[in-house]
Amino acid sequence: MSRGKILFQISGSIACYKACQLLSRLVQSGFEVEVVASKSALAFVGEATLEGLTGKPVHTDTFARGQTMNHIHLIRWADLVLLCPASANTINKFASGVADDLLSTLFLAHDFRKPYLVAPAMNAQMLRHPATQASIEKLTEWGIEFLGTGSGALACGEVGEGRLLEPDVLYSLVEKRFAPVPGKKLELLITAGGTREPIDGVRSIANSSTGRTGAALADYFSSQGHRVTFLHARDSSPPNVVPSRDIPFSSFADLEKALKKELGQNRYDAVIHAAAVADFTVDSVNTDGRAVKPEADGKIDSQGEISIKLKRTPKLVDHLRDQSLNPKLRVVAFKLTMGADSASRERAVETLAERARPDFIVHNDLSEITSDAHGATIYSGNKKIATTGSKAELARRLENYLLETEAQR
Ligand SMILES: Cc1cc2nc3c(=O)[nH]c(=O)nc-3n(C[C@H](O)[C@H](O)[C@H](O)COP(=O)(O)O)c2cc1C
C-alpha cells in the first residue's frame, strides 16, 4: 500500500545528485513518487537515473504528446509537492508567476491546499541576493514552506549558507507530513554556541564555537518529532527546523541562570549540552590602577595600561542533574580537544566522566572537524561505544542511546 503520493520536482543545481538519494529513500519506503524535472536538472542527472529510481517516466515537457494536461493532473494527483533542489532561478520564477515550463506551470496550478515544500540549494551570494530573498518572503507569505539550507562547503569553492539539507533530514521532514514518527518522544534541552564574557559595555571575550553541532542536533531531533528547547548563543548558527522553544543567551551568567530555570521548571528527559562555556569570566578590568567591574556601562578608555583579571567559572555540566525536576535526567556532555593524541583524549574524557558523571560524552578533536566531516567518539561513562563521521550520524546514535536508556528506566 502506498504511504502517500509525492510530486517530486527537481530544478537545476549541483545538488541534484543528493536529491536522487532522497528520491530513492522515499520510493524504497513505500511512497508513490512522480518526478518532474526542469531542462537544466537533466543536465545534472540523467533521465535514466530518475526513471531507474522511480520505475516511472520523468515528466519534463509541458507539451508531451498524450500528456498535455499533466500540468493540472499531476498537481491534483499529489498529496504533497516537493521542489528539491530548488534553484534560485526557479524560486524567482515562481515568485513572479512565470509559467514557461512544466515545473513553473505546475506551481501556478497549485491551489495552496496541500503542502508545497521547497528545499533550496545554491551559492551563498545567490541565496543572499535581494531578488531571491524577496521571492522567498513572497512565496512564504503565499503558504509555501521553505525547509531551510545547511551551511558548509559549496560547490563553487566558497563556504557559507546555501547547501541542500542532507537527504536524511529532508526525508524526515517529508515523512513527518504524512504520519507522525512512531515511538517515544523525548523532551530535550539542547545547548549550543559559545558564551561571551563582557569586558565593558562593548567588548567581550568569546570563543570560536559556531553552534553548528547543537543546531544540527536540534534539527535532527525536531525532525524526528521530539520536543526540543534550543538554548543558544545569540550569534550562533540557527537550526533549519524551528524548535519547540528557542531561548538565547549571551554570557556564562545568562546560560547558568537559564539552565537553572529550565531544569527547575520543566521535566526534561535529557540535556544535550553542546554549548562551549567559558572557563573564565572577567572579574575586573584595571586601567591605570583603577579596577572597573565588567558589568559597568560604557566603554573603557583605550589609552594607558590595561589589565584584565579573570576568575574561574564553575562547571555547569556538573550540576545539571541536581537542578533537574527529573532525577533521572540523562546528560550528554561534550569534550573538545585540540590536536590531542589518543592518550590525552582518553584522559580528558576520563576526567570529565569522573567529575560530572554524565550518561554520555561526545568527544571531538578540532583536527577531525572540517566543513565536510565531523568526526566524534561517543562514550558511556569512560567506555568508548561508537565513532561517528558526521553530525547526522552523531544525532542518530545519540537518539538511539537516549531511547534505549529511556526504555530501561
Ligand atoms: C555546474 C553548475 C552548478 C549550478 N548549481 C546551481 C545551484 O546549486 N543552484 C542554483 O540555483 N543554480 C545553479 N546553477 C545555475 C542553474 O542551473 C541555472 O540558473 C539554470 O538556469 C536553472 O534552471 P532551472 O531553475 O529551470 O532548473 C548551476 C549551474 C552550473 C553550470
Image: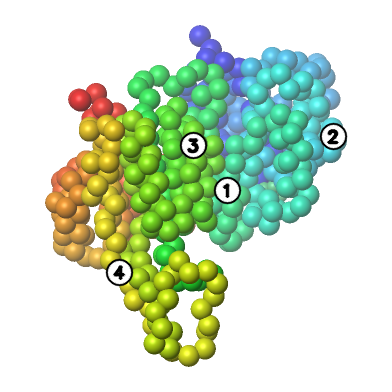
Q: Do the residues bearing badges 3 and 1 touch, measured as CB atoms within 8 Å?
A: no
Placement of the C terminus among the 4 image quadrants = top left
Residue that badge 3 annotates? 245
Residue at 52% of width from left, 88% of height from top? 303
Question: Compared to 320, does 280 lie above or below?
Answer: below
- Dot 1 and dot 4 residues touching (CB under 8 Å): no
* Element class at badge 2: loop
Q: Secondary structure at mark 1?
A: strand
- For mark 4, what is the residue? 311
Label 1 to label 4, Cα distance in Å?
41 Å
Q: Which residue is mark 2?
A: 97
Q: Residue 160, percent across and down?
A: 57, 57
| SS assignment at label 4 | strand
Q: In the drawing, does residue 344 fall left or right of residue 156?
A: left
Three-letter amino acid code of the residue under disc 1: Arg
Q: Are marks 4 and 2 in contact (CB under 8 Å)?
A: no
Q: Nearer the viewer, mark 1 or mark 4?
A: 4
Mark 3 residue CB less than 8 A from any atom of ligand 1: no
Under circle 3, the secondary element is strand
Q: Is label 3 or label 2 in front? A: 3
- Measured Cα–Cα span from mark 3 to mark 2: 35 Å
Say which amino acid is labelled 2.
Answer: Gly
- Assess mark 4: CB under 8 A from ligand 1? no
Q: Which residue is mark 1?
A: 163
Q: In this orientation, which residue lies closer to the viewer: 27 or 239?
A: 239
Label 2 within 8 A of ligand 1 by Cβ: no
Q: N-terminal of the two: label 3 or label 2?
A: 2
Between label 3 and label 1, give the one nearer the viewer.
3
